[in-house]
């Protein structure tokens, strides 16, 4: 389980275009690495659109955005096209990265317990260390949650 101060585990997985994404590609930038349960569902769409709508602001502040779920490349492609998402959505179909970040576990939805992807956001600093972990993501205001961490 990764914690604040740890080096971020690398990714090396394909995005919606089939291009391999590695954290090393973002050296010197802050990275918002967010894990979400499923493409094109209400909460996941709200979160992705929060990042899309504030994308330029995040870029201007030195952030790169990477979304991760267990959906496949084709699903990510449709989701990204439908909502015009300008950042990579990584396909972790084997859940290796999801589990490495502790974003897999027991969830309770409508009183029913199941295992699945836990919605979490990790902020990785310019040196590749985890600087913040957001466990309770506000899908409607995901960008504001990130920016508040750096407004002090």
Image (cartoon, rainbow, N blue to C red):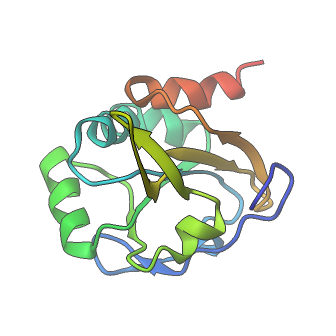
Q: Quadrant of residue 7?
A: bottom right
Q: Quadrant of the C terminus?
A: top right
131 sits left or right of 41 in the view: right
| Residue 44, image x, y percentages | 32, 42
Q: Is residue 104 above or below residue 95?
A: above
127 sits left or right of 133 in the view: right
| Residue 120, image x, y percentages | 55, 45
Residue projecting furthest to the right: 5
Any part of residue 3 in sight: yes
Q: Quadrant of the N terminus?
A: bottom right
Residue depicted at x 38% and y 25%: 140
Any part of residue 118 in sight: no
| Residue 136, image x, y percentages | 57, 32
Q: Quadrant of residue 81?
A: bottom left
Residue depicted at x 15% and y 61%: 78
Residue projecting furthest to the top: 152
């Amino acid at each position: 389980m990764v914690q604040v101060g740890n080096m971020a585990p690398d990714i090396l997985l394909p995005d919606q275009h089939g291009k391999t994404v590695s954290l090393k590609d973002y050296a010197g930038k802050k990275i918002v690495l967010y894990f979400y349960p499923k493409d094109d569902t209400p909460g996941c769409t709200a979160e992705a659109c929060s990042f899309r709508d504030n994308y330029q602001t995040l870029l201007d502040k030195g952030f790169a955005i990477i979304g991760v779920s267990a959906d496949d490349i084709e699903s990510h492609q449709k989701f990204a096209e439908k909502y015009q998402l300008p950042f990579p959505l990584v396909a972790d179909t084997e859940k290796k990265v999801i589990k490495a970040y502790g974003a897999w576990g027991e969830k309770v939805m409508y009183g029913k317990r199941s295992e699945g992807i836990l919605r979490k956001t990790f902020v990785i600093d310019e040196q590749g260390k985890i600087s913040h972990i957001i466990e309770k993501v506000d899908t409607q205001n995901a960008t504001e949650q990130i920016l508040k961490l750096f407004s002090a």
